[in-house]
Amino acid sequence: MAVDGTQGVGGTNGTGSSTFGSSGAAQQKATLNYDNFLQLLVAQMKNQDPTDPMDASEQMSQLASFSQVEQTIQTNSKLDTLLTSSSLTQASSYIGKYMESADGSSKGTVESVKVYSDGLIATLDNGGKILIQPGISISDSAPTNGSGDDSSSNDSGDDSATDGTSGV
């Protein structure tokens, strides 16, 4: 039984460019595989032995399995988008806040935040950088004590948080 249309999977699309070069490569690959499955199913039905036809429940089982894989890939894509959006929202909420690293070596007002795939890094007004992680202190403004010196511990009772996920 000869089936056409499966030669382009994972190769080139006739224009010399890769068929899976985009950011949605997994979704595109799953779609191509799903389309190929349907083509194979139709070819199998056309070429089946009339005295021994294919079992309908087996066809439905195969179709359901491929549909489930396609839906899982789409769900993962949407979750990735949601996580990216959440990271951007979280990053923007730190700008203008006073932050102190867990070890106390860096402190200052956050001027910008860079979002990386494995976390956030805040750049302070004094040029310092802090990895946003549990143990950091965040407050709306720099702590004050009687002398105006920022270098002492924060005993003023302001609304500072002690980790990167609360008090923002």
Image (cartoon, rainbow, N blue to C red):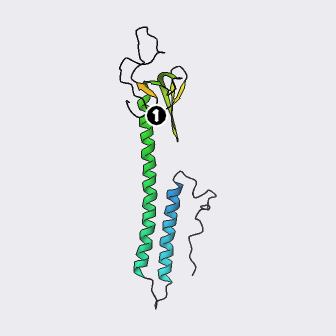
Q: Residue at x 41, y 69 (%)?
A: 64
Q: Residue at x 49, y 62 (%)?
A: 31
- Circle 1 crowding by C-alpha within 10 Å: few under 14, some 14–19, many from 20: some
The image quadrant where one finds the N terminus is bottom right
- 18 shown above or below 47: above
Quarter location, residue 146: top left
Front one among 60 and 13: 60
Front one among 127 and 20: 127
Which residue corresponds to mark 1?
134
In this rendering, position of residue 94 left or right of residue 25: left
- Picture coordinates of residue 97, whole percent (x, y): 42, 24
Q: Residue furthest top?
A: 147
In this rendering, position of residue 119 left or right of residue 12: left
Judged from the image, the secondary structure of the residue bearing numbered disc 1 is loop
Q: Residue at x 55, y 23 (%)?
A: 128
- Picture coordinates of residue 78, whole percent (x, y): 42, 51
Check disc 1 and give the amino acid type: Pro
Q: Residue furthest right?
A: 16
The image quadrant where one finds the C terminus is top left
- 61 shown above or below 31: below
